[in-house]
């Protein structure tokens, strides 16, 4: 699977889970956050595509993904990232 496809799939999962992705220029803020009770994932907008994918995957590893369909390759990718491969 191409990185662009993985990234689009991860963004689609966020949308299904009602998680807003915020792109920030400030490199100090990143990861999962709750703002006014709403879930957000903060990503540095200057990250490469690979870094954005890793950031989304890292944030998703702590999210309940059981209630939605995720392509096996994407679920495996999230799991592999979360255990450090």
Image (cartoon, rainbow, N blue to C red):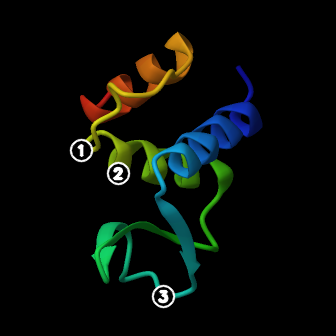
Observer-nearest of 13 and 75: 13
The x and y percentages for residue 58 are 35, 46
Q: Nearer the viewer, mark 2 or mark 3?
A: 2
What number is the disc on residue 17?
Answer: none
Q: Nearer the viewer, mark 3 or mark 1?
A: 1
The x and y percentages for residue 43 are 50, 68
The x and y percentages for residue 37 are 28, 75
Residue with the mark numbered 2: 59
Quarter of the picture holding the C terminus: top left
Measure how far apart labels 1 and 2 are at the Cα level. Answer: 6 Å
Name which of mark 3 and mark 1 comes first in the sequence: 3
Observer-nearest of 25 and 59: 59
Q: Residues within 10 Å of mark 2 (few under 14, many from 20)?
A: some
Residue at 36% of width from left, 23% of height from top? Answer: 80
Residue 23 picture quarter: bottom right
Residue at 65% of width from left, 58% of height from top? Answer: 48
SS class of the residue under badge 2?
helix
SS class of the residue under badge 1?
loop
Q: Residues within 10 Å of mark 3 (few under 14, many from 20)?
A: few
Say whether marks 2 and 3 touch (CB < 8 Å): no
What number is the disc on residue 26?
Answer: 3
Measure how far apart labels 3 and 1 are at the Cα level. Answer: 23 Å
Name which of mark 2 and mark 3 comes first in the sequence: 3
Measure how far apart labels 2 and 3 are at the Cα level. Answer: 18 Å
Tell me if 1 is positioned left or right of 16 in this view. Answer: right
Say whether marks 1 and 2 touch (CB < 8 Å): yes
Residue with the mark numbered 1: 62
- Quick check: 51 above or below 73? below
């Amino acid at each position: 699977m191409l990185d662009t496809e993985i990234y689009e799939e991860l963004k689609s999962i966020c949308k299904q889970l009602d998680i807003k992705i915020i792109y920030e220029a400030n490199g100090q803020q990143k990861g999962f956050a709750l703002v006014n009770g709403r879930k957000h994932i903060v990503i540095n907008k200057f990250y490469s595509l690979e870094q954005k994918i890793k950031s989304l995957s890292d944030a998703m590893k702590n999210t309940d993904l059981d209630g939605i369909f995720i392509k096996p390759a994407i679920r495996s990718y999230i799991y592999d990232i979360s255990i450090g491969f």
